Amino acid sequence: MSTAGPPQGDRHRSPQGEGSTARYIDARHVWQRYGDHVVLENLNLAVQEGEFCTLVGASGCGKSTFLRLLLGQETPSKGQLLLQGQPLAAEPDASRGVVFQRYSVFPHLSVLDNVAIGLELPAAPLWGRLFGARKRVAREAAAQMLERVGLGHALGKYPSQLSGGMQQRLAIAQALIVRPRVLLLDEPFGALDPGIRKDMHVLLLELWRETRLTVFMVTHDLAEGFHLGTRLLVFDKLRIDPQAPQAYGARITYDIPLNPERSGGALAALARVTDTPILETQT
Ligand SMILES: Nc1ncnc2c1ncn2[C@@H]1O[C@H](COP(=O)(O)OP(=O)(O)OP(=O)(O)O)[C@@H](O)[C@H]1O
Protein backbone atom coordinates (compact mmCIF):
# COMPACT_ATOMS: atom_id res chain seq x y z
CA MET A 1 0.00 0.00 0.00
CA SER A 2 1.22 3.50 -0.70
CA THR A 3 2.27 5.58 2.21
CA ALA A 4 0.80 9.04 2.25
CA GLY A 5 3.59 11.56 2.41
CA PRO A 6 3.34 15.13 1.22
CA PRO A 7 2.27 15.28 -2.43
CA GLN A 8 5.21 14.96 -4.78
CA GLY A 9 5.92 18.15 -6.64
CA ASP A 10 3.03 19.84 -4.88
CA ARG A 11 2.08 22.65 -7.20
CA HIS A 12 -1.05 23.47 -5.31
CA ARG A 13 0.09 25.22 -2.20
CA SER A 14 -2.51 27.33 -0.51
CA PRO A 15 -1.90 31.06 -0.77
CA GLN A 16 -3.76 31.41 2.53
CA GLY A 17 -1.46 28.95 4.20
CA GLU A 18 1.60 31.11 3.82
CA GLY A 19 2.27 34.78 4.13
CA SER A 20 -1.21 36.26 4.59
CA THR A 21 -1.88 38.74 7.36
CA ALA A 22 -4.54 39.10 10.05
CA ARG A 23 -4.81 35.38 10.70
CA TYR A 24 -7.31 34.57 13.38
CA ILE A 25 -7.31 30.85 12.80
CA ASP A 26 -4.38 29.28 11.11
CA ALA A 27 -4.15 25.64 10.01
CA ARG A 28 -0.59 24.81 9.04
CA HIS A 29 0.18 21.57 7.25
CA VAL A 30 -2.51 19.74 9.19
CA TRP A 31 -2.79 15.98 8.82
CA GLN A 32 -5.26 13.70 10.53
CA ARG A 33 -5.02 9.96 10.27
CA TYR A 34 -6.72 7.12 12.10
CA GLY A 35 -4.39 4.14 11.87
CA ASP A 36 -3.74 3.65 8.16
CA HIS A 37 -6.64 5.85 7.19
CA VAL A 38 -5.44 9.30 6.13
CA VAL A 39 -8.42 11.64 6.38
CA LEU A 40 -6.83 15.09 6.10
CA GLU A 41 -3.62 15.61 4.19
CA ASN A 42 -1.44 18.67 4.53
CA LEU A 43 -4.34 21.07 4.93
CA ASN A 44 -3.50 24.79 5.03
CA LEU A 45 -5.95 27.55 5.80
CA ALA A 46 -5.88 31.06 7.23
CA VAL A 47 -9.11 32.64 8.38
CA GLN A 48 -9.72 36.20 9.52
CA GLU A 49 -11.86 37.00 12.53
CA GLY A 50 -15.51 37.34 11.60
CA GLU A 51 -15.45 35.25 8.46
CA PHE A 52 -18.33 32.87 7.77
CA CYS A 53 -16.79 29.77 6.23
CA THR A 54 -19.02 27.10 4.74
CA LEU A 55 -17.45 23.67 4.29
CA VAL A 56 -18.61 21.37 1.52
CA GLY A 57 -17.30 18.16 -0.01
CA ALA A 58 -18.08 14.51 -0.60
CA SER A 59 -19.35 12.41 2.25
CA GLY A 60 -16.50 11.04 4.36
CA CYS A 61 -13.87 13.49 3.12
CA GLY A 62 -13.10 14.88 6.55
CA LYS A 63 -15.22 18.01 7.06
CA SER A 64 -16.47 16.94 10.49
CA THR A 65 -12.98 15.79 11.35
CA PHE A 66 -11.72 19.30 10.66
CA LEU A 67 -14.48 20.74 12.89
CA ARG A 68 -13.47 18.35 15.68
CA LEU A 69 -9.89 19.56 15.36
CA LEU A 70 -11.07 23.17 15.55
CA LEU A 71 -13.19 22.30 18.58
CA GLY A 72 -10.23 20.69 20.32
CA GLN A 73 -11.97 17.32 20.56
CA GLU A 74 -9.04 15.83 18.64
CA THR A 75 -5.50 16.96 17.97
CA PRO A 76 -3.93 16.72 14.51
CA SER A 77 -1.63 13.78 13.78
CA LYS A 78 0.75 16.32 12.28
CA GLY A 79 0.79 20.05 11.78
CA GLN A 80 -0.51 22.96 13.82
CA LEU A 81 -3.80 24.68 14.48
CA LEU A 82 -3.41 28.18 15.86
CA LEU A 83 -5.93 30.60 17.30
CA GLN A 84 -4.53 34.13 17.27
CA GLY A 85 -1.04 32.68 16.90
CA GLN A 86 -1.38 30.32 19.89
CA PRO A 87 -1.95 26.56 19.65
CA LEU A 88 -5.62 25.75 20.05
CA ALA A 89 -6.53 24.44 23.50
CA ALA A 90 -6.37 20.65 23.34
CA GLU A 91 -9.89 20.30 24.67
CA PRO A 92 -13.14 22.17 24.03
CA ASP A 93 -13.52 25.42 25.96
CA ALA A 94 -15.84 28.40 26.04
CA SER A 95 -14.03 30.12 23.16
CA ARG A 96 -15.64 27.66 20.75
CA GLY A 97 -19.33 26.83 20.56
CA VAL A 98 -20.69 23.91 18.59
CA VAL A 99 -24.04 22.86 17.15
CA PHE A 100 -24.56 19.42 15.63
CA GLN A 101 -27.32 18.20 13.36
CA ARG A 102 -29.07 16.50 16.27
CA TYR A 103 -28.81 15.69 19.95
CA SER A 104 -26.93 18.81 21.02
CA VAL A 105 -29.37 19.57 23.83
CA PHE A 106 -30.01 17.89 27.17
CA PRO A 107 -33.35 16.04 26.93
CA HIS A 108 -33.97 16.01 30.69
CA LEU A 109 -33.58 19.77 31.15
CA SER A 110 -36.14 22.45 30.36
CA VAL A 111 -35.44 24.91 27.56
CA LEU A 112 -34.42 27.57 30.08
CA ASP A 113 -32.19 25.17 32.04
CA ASN A 114 -30.57 23.92 28.85
CA VAL A 115 -29.23 27.41 28.23
CA ALA A 116 -28.74 28.59 31.84
CA ILE A 117 -26.58 25.58 32.62
CA GLY A 118 -23.98 26.91 30.18
CA LEU A 119 -23.50 29.86 32.57
CA GLU A 120 -24.02 27.93 35.79
CA LEU A 121 -21.61 25.05 35.22
CA PRO A 122 -18.45 27.11 34.72
CA ALA A 123 -19.38 29.41 37.64
CA ALA A 124 -20.23 26.55 40.03
CA PRO A 125 -18.27 23.52 38.82
CA LEU A 126 -18.79 21.62 42.07
CA TRP A 127 -22.57 21.84 42.35
CA GLY A 128 -23.36 22.48 38.72
CA ARG A 129 -25.90 25.08 39.84
CA LEU A 130 -25.86 28.63 41.15
CA PHE A 131 -28.03 29.98 43.93
CA GLY A 132 -29.60 33.31 44.86
CA ALA A 133 -28.80 36.45 42.91
CA ARG A 134 -26.19 34.81 40.68
CA LYS A 135 -28.69 32.16 39.66
CA ARG A 136 -31.27 34.85 38.85
CA VAL A 137 -28.77 36.75 36.70
CA ALA A 138 -27.81 33.58 34.81
CA ARG A 139 -31.43 32.67 34.18
CA GLU A 140 -32.29 36.16 33.03
CA ALA A 141 -29.41 36.10 30.57
CA ALA A 142 -30.54 32.68 29.34
CA ALA A 143 -34.12 33.89 28.95
CA GLN A 144 -32.92 36.90 26.93
CA MET A 145 -30.89 34.66 24.65
CA LEU A 146 -33.88 32.38 24.17
CA GLU A 147 -36.03 35.39 23.36
CA ARG A 148 -33.45 36.37 20.78
CA VAL A 149 -33.66 33.01 19.00
CA GLY A 150 -37.46 33.03 19.10
CA LEU A 151 -38.02 30.66 22.02
CA GLY A 152 -39.10 33.18 24.62
CA HIS A 153 -42.51 31.51 24.78
CA ALA A 154 -41.11 28.01 25.46
CA LEU A 155 -38.86 28.46 28.49
CA GLY A 156 -40.56 25.74 30.57
CA LYS A 157 -40.85 23.16 27.81
CA TYR A 158 -38.61 20.14 27.33
CA PRO A 159 -36.73 19.37 24.09
CA SER A 160 -39.06 16.47 23.24
CA GLN A 161 -41.93 18.96 23.16
CA LEU A 162 -40.16 21.12 20.54
CA SER A 163 -40.13 20.84 16.76
CA GLY A 164 -36.82 20.15 15.00
CA GLY A 165 -36.39 23.82 14.13
CA MET A 166 -37.08 24.86 17.70
CA GLN A 167 -34.56 22.32 18.98
CA GLN A 168 -31.90 23.77 16.71
CA ARG A 169 -32.78 27.28 17.90
CA LEU A 170 -32.27 25.96 21.42
CA ALA A 171 -28.93 24.39 20.44
CA ILE A 172 -27.81 27.70 18.93
CA ALA A 173 -28.84 29.60 22.07
CA GLN A 174 -26.98 27.04 24.17
CA ALA A 175 -23.85 27.50 22.07
CA LEU A 176 -24.02 31.31 22.09
CA ILE A 177 -24.79 31.91 25.77
CA VAL A 178 -21.14 31.48 26.76
CA ARG A 179 -20.12 34.06 24.15
CA PRO A 180 -17.77 31.93 22.07
CA ARG A 181 -15.53 33.64 19.53
CA VAL A 182 -15.80 30.75 17.10
CA LEU A 183 -19.01 28.94 16.23
CA LEU A 184 -18.78 25.45 14.71
CA LEU A 185 -21.88 24.14 12.99
CA ASP A 186 -22.00 20.55 11.71
CA GLU A 187 -24.94 20.33 9.31
CA PRO A 188 -27.13 22.13 11.82
CA PHE A 189 -30.14 22.37 9.50
CA GLY A 190 -29.71 19.05 7.69
CA ALA A 191 -32.77 17.49 9.31
CA LEU A 192 -35.09 20.48 8.86
CA ASP A 193 -37.79 21.14 6.25
CA PRO A 194 -36.89 23.69 3.55
CA GLY A 195 -39.21 26.41 4.93
CA ILE A 196 -37.81 26.05 8.43
CA ARG A 197 -34.26 26.06 7.04
CA LYS A 198 -34.92 29.44 5.44
CA ASP A 199 -36.04 30.85 8.78
CA MET A 200 -32.91 29.40 10.39
CA HIS A 201 -30.73 31.01 7.71
CA VAL A 202 -32.24 34.40 8.51
CA LEU A 203 -31.69 33.87 12.24
CA LEU A 204 -28.14 32.65 11.82
CA LEU A 205 -27.14 35.57 9.60
CA GLU A 206 -28.70 38.03 12.04
CA LEU A 207 -26.83 36.49 14.97
CA TRP A 208 -23.59 36.43 12.99
CA ARG A 209 -23.96 40.11 12.08
CA GLU A 210 -24.64 41.02 15.71
CA THR A 211 -21.82 38.97 17.23
CA ARG A 212 -19.23 39.07 14.42
CA LEU A 213 -18.39 35.50 15.31
CA THR A 214 -16.05 33.47 13.18
CA VAL A 215 -18.20 30.66 11.82
CA PHE A 216 -17.35 27.28 10.30
CA MET A 217 -20.40 25.48 9.00
CA VAL A 218 -20.45 22.05 7.35
CA THR A 219 -23.29 21.58 4.91
CA HIS A 220 -24.27 19.10 2.22
CA ASP A 221 -26.46 21.72 0.61
CA LEU A 222 -24.31 23.64 -1.83
CA ALA A 223 -26.94 26.36 -2.24
CA GLU A 224 -26.96 26.84 1.54
CA GLY A 225 -23.15 27.05 1.50
CA PHE A 226 -23.18 29.71 -1.20
CA HIS A 227 -26.00 31.65 0.41
CA LEU A 228 -24.65 31.82 3.95
CA GLY A 229 -20.89 31.94 3.61
CA THR A 230 -18.48 34.75 3.01
CA ARG A 231 -16.16 31.97 1.97
CA LEU A 232 -16.86 28.50 0.59
CA LEU A 233 -14.22 25.87 1.37
CA VAL A 234 -14.32 22.75 -0.80
CA PHE A 235 -12.77 19.61 0.71
CA ASP A 236 -11.46 17.05 -1.75
CA LYS A 237 -8.60 14.64 -2.36
CA LEU A 238 -5.85 15.68 -4.69
CA ARG A 239 -4.87 12.11 -5.35
CA ILE A 240 -6.54 8.74 -5.16
CA ASP A 241 -5.17 5.22 -5.14
CA PRO A 242 -7.96 2.83 -6.19
CA GLN A 243 -6.04 -0.03 -4.55
CA ALA A 244 -5.75 1.86 -1.28
CA PRO A 245 -8.61 4.33 -1.01
CA GLN A 246 -7.63 5.31 2.54
CA ALA A 247 -4.00 6.11 1.69
CA TYR A 248 -4.59 9.74 0.81
CA GLY A 249 -6.58 12.40 2.55
CA ALA A 250 -8.47 15.53 1.63
CA ARG A 251 -7.52 19.14 1.83
CA ILE A 252 -9.14 22.39 0.79
CA THR A 253 -9.07 22.35 -2.99
CA TYR A 254 -11.17 25.44 -3.64
CA ASP A 255 -11.58 28.52 -1.49
CA ILE A 256 -14.22 30.77 -2.99
CA PRO A 257 -15.00 34.29 -1.72
CA LEU A 258 -18.72 34.93 -1.43
CA ASN A 259 -21.17 37.67 -0.59
CA PRO A 260 -18.60 40.50 -0.50
CA GLU A 261 -21.26 42.94 0.68
CA ARG A 262 -21.27 41.04 3.97
CA SER A 263 -17.56 40.60 4.36
CA GLY A 264 -16.75 44.27 3.82
CA GLY A 265 -14.66 43.50 0.75
CA ALA A 266 -11.69 42.52 2.90
CA LEU A 267 -11.90 38.96 1.76
CA ALA A 268 -11.47 39.66 -1.90
CA ALA A 269 -7.75 40.02 -1.43
CA LEU A 270 -7.48 36.98 0.79
CA ALA A 271 -9.67 34.25 -0.51
CA ARG A 272 -9.14 32.72 -3.89
CA VAL A 273 -8.74 29.35 -5.45
CA THR A 274 -6.23 27.41 -3.39
CA ASP A 275 -5.45 23.99 -4.76
CA THR A 276 -6.46 22.89 -8.21
CA PRO A 277 -8.05 19.48 -7.79
CA ILE A 278 -6.05 17.09 -9.88
CA LEU A 279 -6.66 13.42 -9.37
CA GLU A 280 -3.43 11.51 -9.42
CA THR A 281 -3.92 7.80 -9.81
CA GLN A 282 -1.18 5.81 -8.14
CA THR A 283 -0.65 2.20 -8.97
N1 LIG B 1 -12.31 8.49 15.39
C1 LIG B 1 -12.22 7.94 14.18
N2 LIG B 1 -11.60 6.75 13.99
C2 LIG B 1 -11.50 6.20 12.78
N3 LIG B 1 -12.01 6.75 11.66
C3 LIG B 1 -12.64 7.91 11.77
C4 LIG B 1 -12.78 8.58 13.02
N4 LIG B 1 -13.45 9.74 12.82
C5 LIG B 1 -13.70 9.79 11.51
N5 LIG B 1 -13.23 8.71 10.88
C6 LIG B 1 -13.31 8.44 9.44
O1 LIG B 1 -12.82 9.59 8.80
C7 LIG B 1 -13.51 9.79 7.59
C8 LIG B 1 -13.99 11.22 7.54
O2 LIG B 1 -15.08 11.38 8.42
P1 LIG B 1 -15.84 12.77 8.57
O3 LIG B 1 -17.03 12.51 9.45
O4 LIG B 1 -14.89 13.81 9.01
O5 LIG B 1 -16.28 13.07 7.09
P2 LIG B 1 -17.33 14.14 6.56
O6 LIG B 1 -16.73 14.78 5.37
O7 LIG B 1 -17.78 15.03 7.65
O8 LIG B 1 -18.51 13.16 6.14
P3 LIG B 1 -20.09 13.45 6.04
O9 LIG B 1 -20.23 14.55 5.04
O10 LIG B 1 -20.66 12.14 5.58
O11 LIG B 1 -20.55 13.83 7.42
C9 LIG B 1 -14.61 8.76 7.54
O12 LIG B 1 -14.21 7.70 6.69
C10 LIG B 1 -14.72 8.28 8.96
O13 LIG B 1 -15.13 6.94 9.00
Image (cartoon, helix red, strand yellow):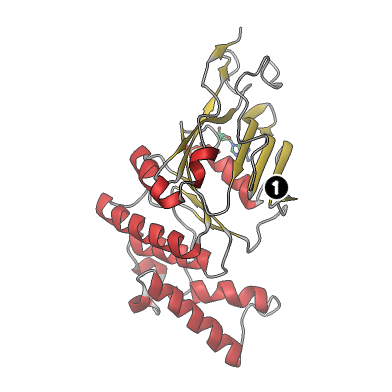
Q: Amino acid at mark 1?
A: Leu
Label 1, secondary structure: give it: strand
Q: To which quarter of the image does residue 122 belong? A: bottom right
Q: What residue is drawn where x is 64% and y is 39%?
A: 20
Q: Residue 1 in the image: x percent, y percent?
A: 68, 14
Q: What residue is drawn where x is 38% and y is 41%?
A: 226
126 relative position to 181: left or right: right
Residue in front for this viewpoint, 181 or 199: 181
Extreme residue toward the bottom, this view = 132
Query: The C terminus appears in which quarter of the rendering?
Result: top right
Q: Which residue is mark 1?
A: 82
Q: Note whether 131 is above or below 32 in the view shown.
A: below
Ligand 1 near label 1 (Cβ, under 8 Å)?
no
Q: Note whether 94 is above or below 49 in the view shown.
A: below
Count of numbered tags: 1
164 relative position to 177: left or right: left
Q: To which quarter of the image does residue 19 belong? A: top right
Q: Residues within 10 Å of mark 1 (few under 14, many from 20)?
A: some
Extreme residue toward the top, this view = 283
Residue in front for this viewpoint, 237 or 129: 237
Extreme residue toward the left, this view = 195
Q: Residue 11 in the image: x percent, y percent?
A: 62, 18
Q: What residue is drawn where x is 45% and y is 46%?
A: 230
Q: Residue 217 in the image: x percent, y percent?
A: 48, 48
Which quarter of the rendered image does ligand 1 occupy? Answer: top right
Q: Note whether 214 is above or below 111 in the view shown.
A: above
Examine the rendering and report whether any part of residue 64 can be seen: yes
Residue in front for this viewpoint, 67 or 104: 67
Q: Residue 30 in the image: x percent, y percent?
A: 68, 35
